[in-house]
Image (tube, rainbow, N blue to C red):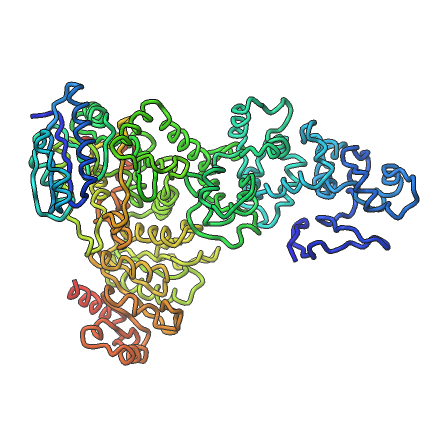
Amino acid sequence: MRWTKAPGRLRRRARGGPDHLGSRTVEPLPRHFHGLPAEADGETLPDILFDEAFYRRRYLDSGPPGVDARQHFDDRGRAEGKAPSLGAVYLTEAIRRRALTSSTPMADIVGLVPPESRELVRGGDLWERLWACAHPDLYAAQLGRDAADPCDADWAVADLLAEGARAGRRICALFNPQWYEQQLVDRARAVPDGVIPFFHWLTAGWDARIVPTPLFDEEFYRQQHPRLSGPWLFRQYLTRGCYRAQSRPSPVGRHHPGGDDPTAQQRRRPLLLREMMHRRHEFDLAQTSWLEEGCVAALRRYATLGSPLMQQLVMKAASIDPLVTATASHRRLVSCPPHRHPRLYLSEQVEALRVGLGQNTADTVILVPQLVPHPELPRALRLARAYRDAEPEGQVLLVGTDEREAPGREVDDAFPTVDLMAYAEGFGADQALAMLVDLVRGLCAERIVVIGSRRGQEMVATYGRQLSREAELGAWLLAGQPARQDGTTGDGGYEELGAVTDWFLVDDQEVRTALIERDALTGASRERLFAVDGLARPEGDLPLLARLADVSRRRA
Amino acid sequence: MSDISAILTAHAEGALAALSLRSFLEASAVARDAGLTVELLVVLDNPDPATVEALSAARRLGCEVQRVAFADQGLVRNHGVKAVGGDFIAFLDGDDLWSENWLVEAHRVCRSAPGQVIAHPEVNWFFGNSPWLYFLPDQTDGFHPSLMRVANPWDALCMAPAAAYAEVPFSRRAITDGYAFEDWHWSMETFAAGYVHRVAPGTIHFKRRREGSQFMEARANRSLTRPSPVLTYAWTEHRLESGNADVAGGGP
């Protein structure tokens, strides 16, 4: 089985499964076709959208001999909803949309294709290429929309064919008009007047295997992925590679912040789209982007190594140590800040977080999995209020570290919050962790408390020995949380955090006792473990905080 | 007092140190040909016999040679700074190479604003394992200090005013405490002190990447840089409010 796209939704069909037309069995159409849209009834079907062989094979094989296929379509087939060509099957929604503003919608769409390549219009290959290139979020951004319907490449393609191409919009993140035109110049060719560059590439450029983007280097990609084969790996990258985190398309970077996204291909959201859309309002996305400009600048710097001076310097060094030039140049990675660097986008995001937070310091930083809704939040708020009561001048910050905050819900106006994942989405684990470390060090936090936060636990487990020199570390252990690395149900991180954390809280004495017995805790370790509800109240939590501070001081 | 003090540090590079010495001497000769005076110092830190052998010709070829026992790259460099008297100091590690024009071009950049500029090569050409080309950023060309919070833009194989090394000495290595990346820390501290990190166009450092290097060890050990003002939000905000992030605010 495979998934095929129909407008606005996914439908499943059997690969190669037959359509039944009367008594005959023919290959299924690549998408549902219910006839040319009524909106185009006033326009004669352009010849190029009629494929006699296709029509005859599909509809007339068992008919009487000598029937004029085109006449048959005009007289009956059109009204009966028969498909005039494979190409036309792809275009119905675009024709419908174009008909809203034009009396010749089909001719207009056919006219997008360069005259010398117009034969491609009849068949399905050209349109399959176009659908493979469709990145609806990029397209939607040029219309001022935050995002397209995640699945709706059909919407984007139809809009492109109906209006967008003439308006200069870009549908394909891997097509850069200026880069493509330069590739043509390098081959002593050019886009003819009146032809839209993207459609020139989609036909002539595709057939000539021209890579139309600075984001992909065919030779480098082949070296990085030796198991891939084929004469033109750009096609593989366009259709599959750009959705996979492990792809290495260019010496100047992987073009994404490291995280995988299993839904990327289904959503038609190449991983590089995140960096491409970065600072989107500073760039004309129809032409270029932050990512592409950075790559072009980096490649330009790379090219300077070909100057006579640099070549002479390299050769001189190689005369001292031949290993200098032992590696072929196309296998070298290139970094070039502020244009391209593996951590450049991370540096942009940590700065965006700093600016978005709007405060420079926080005395206490409390890390929870998610700001709202999450069961750990009441504990975090209780602790936050306790610290506020104990230190009225102190600042408490709540940080959601693992999952995005649910929209439209407030945590507690009394405390500032920050949703780390609003900035760390798409990052690999290492870089998201680096962002959290930057946050707590950037704020000069005097106290860091982990309450159920997986990323917080990871931070303390990884960098606890350093952070414990810079801040008081605490954790509220949650019974029944899956915390151990083997996935078994544990106490919320006691084993991982024990060596460097100053103190631990648990909900009640029963949990405390169980932990002490399970781990055979001795004096010093017991003293760091506190049951919140077991403490004397009317004074509130202040005695508890005093004891925590005391434990921390003694450990320091 | 010489224009430039060039310092080659070595430890256990073995025969590779002889290649670095050759590069060291050739760049010095080019600088002398350009009319600069160059003082040459080789510092051996707990050297193994092969490294001693590789550098045995250094004294005969005009270098002063000193042996120390710090087992710490930062402390070796600090020692070297105290042992020389040039206006500007340039370091070379015992398994790396300079492009032959490095000293001349770096000196030209440093002299453009005496006492304020630290010069870096245009390219770090990493060879051996994981070949990589790193074009170093020029602080006056679109650089944002937030990059320093998550990556080290520069390294210590640069040329800087002697006063910069005195004002901002290298930190002791403390990898067991989880702190490493002394170059990174030095970059941040000099940046915070107001020095301007510039690139000397048309120059290359050839840097050998080996398994087990200190950088690789620090990465594997999940080390962090030592705390620095540059890592804090308060410093960043102050920096950005007080002037252009690309240009150092006030020299030393």
In the picture provided, is B88 more to the left or to the right than A473? left
Residue A476 position in % (x across, y down): 31, 68
Residue A117 position in % (x across, y down): 68, 30
Q: Quadrant of the C terminus of chain A?
A: bottom left
Seen from the viewer's position, the closer of residues A481 and A191 is A191
Decide if residue B252 is in sight here: no
Seen from the viewer's position, the closer of residues A180 and A110 is A180
Seen from the viewer's position, the closer of residues A99 and A408 is A99
Q: Quadrant of the N terminus of chain A?
A: bottom right
Rendered view: A442 above or below A406? above
Q: In which image quadrant can residue A209 be found? A: top right
Residue A540 position in % (x across, y down): 27, 71
Seen from the viewer's position, the closer of residues B217 and B52 is B52
Residue at 17 percent of width and 19 percent of height:
B33
Rendered view: B118 above or below B12? above
Residue A311 position in % (x across, y down): 33, 26
User: How many numbered circles does the render carry?
Assistant: 0
Q: In which image quadrant can residue B163 be found? A: top left
Decide if residue B77 is in sight here: yes
